[in-house]
Amino acid sequence: MRERAETVSEERAEIAAGLILAVIGGACVAAAMAAPQPGLDPLGPGALPMAAALIVILLSLAMIGQALRRKRFEPSGSFAETADGSAARQPPSPLPLLLVSLVTLLYVAALAFLRLPYWGATLVFVTITVWLLSNRRIAALPKALAAGVILGFGCDYLFTQIFIVDLP
Amino acid sequence: MDGLLQALPLALSLEGLLFTLIGTTLGILVGSIPGLSGTMLIALSLPLTFTMSPALALMMLVGMYVGSVAGGLISATLLRMPGTPASVLTTLDGYPMARAGRPGRALALGITASFVGGLVSWVALILVSRPLADFALRFTPWDYFAFIMVAMVLIASLSRGAMVKGLLSGFLGILIAMPGSDPSTGMPRLAFGNRAMENGFDVLPVLIGLFAVSQIMRGLTEHLGVAERIEIRRERVTLSLADWRRHGGNMLRSSTLGTLIGILPGVGANVGSVVAYSTARSFSKEPERFGTGSEEAVIASEAGNSATVGGALVPLVAIGIPGSVIDAILIGGLYLHGIVPGPMLFSTNPDVVYAIMISCLVATLMMFVLMTGLVRHLPKLARVDRSLLLPGILVFCIVGSYAATNRFFDVWVMLAFGVLGFLLEKARVPLAPLVIGFILGPLAEAKLRTGLMITAGDPSPLVTQPLPAFLMGIALLLLLWPLLSRLLPPRLKPGARPAGGSGPA
């Protein structure tokens, strides 16, 4: 039953990925059509991008078609129950992914637009992320803060003094 | 041979050995932690090599490559969690051996097989690379283009049995490489009115996004099963002379197969492991034991996957075509250091070529010593607190993407490719063809357009010249193979296995 649930999840992902890639391919075809016409070069700048984009669109549609065909021929059923009627193991919650993604976007935006000092922004980002991934327990806050301090100052020192790399 | 001797002082200098040691150690550590991979480690380490000399950087990266492929053995055997995809088959027999009270024995066989695999493939690297590079110097643009097409189709056709997804991934990689300046006219294309896009996508943000950020996202959405942990007490983790006599043939055969698979463009350690495993089962007097704790199986899987490392470096240094995903990232690393890979590399940057070759051997020796010495402690790494690990990796991803060009555009690109990689993995679209397409796409375009300029737009040399025609024929055969294989009699079909066998085909 768990395998079946995974198959359904894969089919949905195939359809979603196929749609997104087809849209990207469509945008690239439109952009390639606007490219200048060939001059001395027989192909010109737009021909290969257009060919690649068209193939991406075709293969995306083929993947969507395969997913829909599998969906049609497989038996439907409830995925929340096992064969003996008991509740199946729930898939992992997407909440940690969503929360960490949001915090990461805010961290990068803060570095890009607010020009915060790198060590400070990293300290806050790591502290919050470690705490979120520790099931948001109050008891995990000291560990999260320690990780934030070590990574905030440690990365700043490591990259600027040892690897001589520019920081955001 | 002269070049090899000239590169020895650098490769065996304190600095050279230290960087190879750091790379190998990090590779083993990352390889033995389920959820992390050598691909991720090498992609994340590229920005740290900016200030290093190209030769030293490559020595460290090759050390990581060797260490990460071998390191997967530890958690595969003791925790039933393959540290790398290439050690999945080791899990089938290594873990049952460990549960049966022979963890030290399983690890001794695996470590020694990895060592022998590394040595055999290194010999091939030394013997084959230069002649192949000399041969490749005579390639016409059409030959090159056809070669790249074969590499693309080959890797797509091996994509977990789903060729549509493999091809989609490969062409998506080519498409992603297209924005930026047109290589012939210099005019911007696919920039969508965005000035930052006029330079195209930089290699680092794309690689870090696809292999590090997507892996972090996956780590946030999956439970890692906790298997019974098996301790090694006072067992020997080395082989006796009798073991060498008994298993030597299997080790050499599996290593040779792994090396040959590695040399094929675009095919990686996973396939090397599977082919060596299947062949060992065919030759075995006890094929029924495969999948239940067979010593021969552990040896075949580990010799096969480790041997692909040296094998895959052959097309990289000889013709500039990656033998695996990690090799594609290494090619990205060469570009970052202003080095153009290809057959001219032996003339333009002999120090880098021979540093790669020597470090492959040194890293194999170091891997053997380190893994034998640390084998009792490495399994503890699998228990590393992931709530601390993942944010740390994320911080490195952001710095790594920014550092190449000092543009926040690249950080956003990295995050976008992380989401794309995560979605593609959810849909079971393999990422390897995407990376190979992304790295080889511009080269394929340049060769095709040069060829067309020479022939005034006539593409017929692709079918009239012998080498391109042969290569395009292979590509066509691989593309049509799913249809042709249906016409074969059942006993000849791929996946048909001898009676009594178990495990993967």
Image (cartoon, coloured by chain):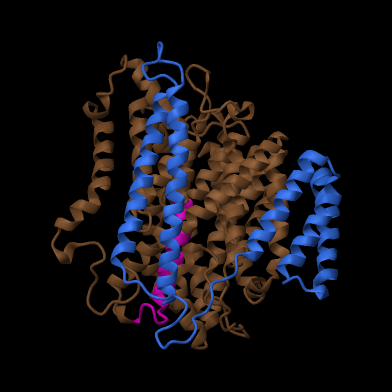
Viewer-side residue, B11 vs B297: B297
Q: Is B26 drawn above or below residue B204 in the view shown? A: below
Dominant secondary structure (helix, strand or loop) of the stretch shown in magenta: helix
From where the camera sits, is residue B362 visible? no
Q: Which residues, given as a range, are shown in magenta?
A: B289-311
Q: Does residue B290 belong to the magenta stretch?
A: yes
What residue is rendered at 49% in x and 16% in y?
Answer: B185
Q: Which chain is blue?
A: A
Viewer-side residue, B439 vs A85: A85
Residue A145 shown left or right of residue B377 in the figure: right
From where the camera sits, is residue A148 visible? yes
User: Total marks drawn?
Assistant: 0
Find residue B431 and report its horizontal and vertical position in percent.
47, 51
Residue B1 shown left or right of residue B454 in the figure: right
What residue is rendered at 41% in x and 11% in y?
Answer: A39
Q: Does residue B305 belong to the magenta stretch?
A: yes
What residue is rendered at 39% in x and 20% in y?
Answer: B450
Viewer-side residue, A25 vs B310: A25
Residue B57, picture quadrant: top right
Q: Is B456 drawn above or below residue B419 in the view shown? A: above
Find residue B335 and report its horizontal and vertical position in percent.
58, 34
Viewer-side residue, B83 vs A74: A74
What residue is rendered at 36% in x and 51% in y?
Answer: A63
Q: Is B184 drawn above or below residue A63 in the view shown? A: above
Q: Which chain is brown?
A: B
Find residue B110 and report its horizontal and vertical position in percent.
49, 71
Q: Quadrant of the C terminus of chain B?
A: bottom left
Find residue B432 and report its horizontal and vertical position in percent.
46, 50
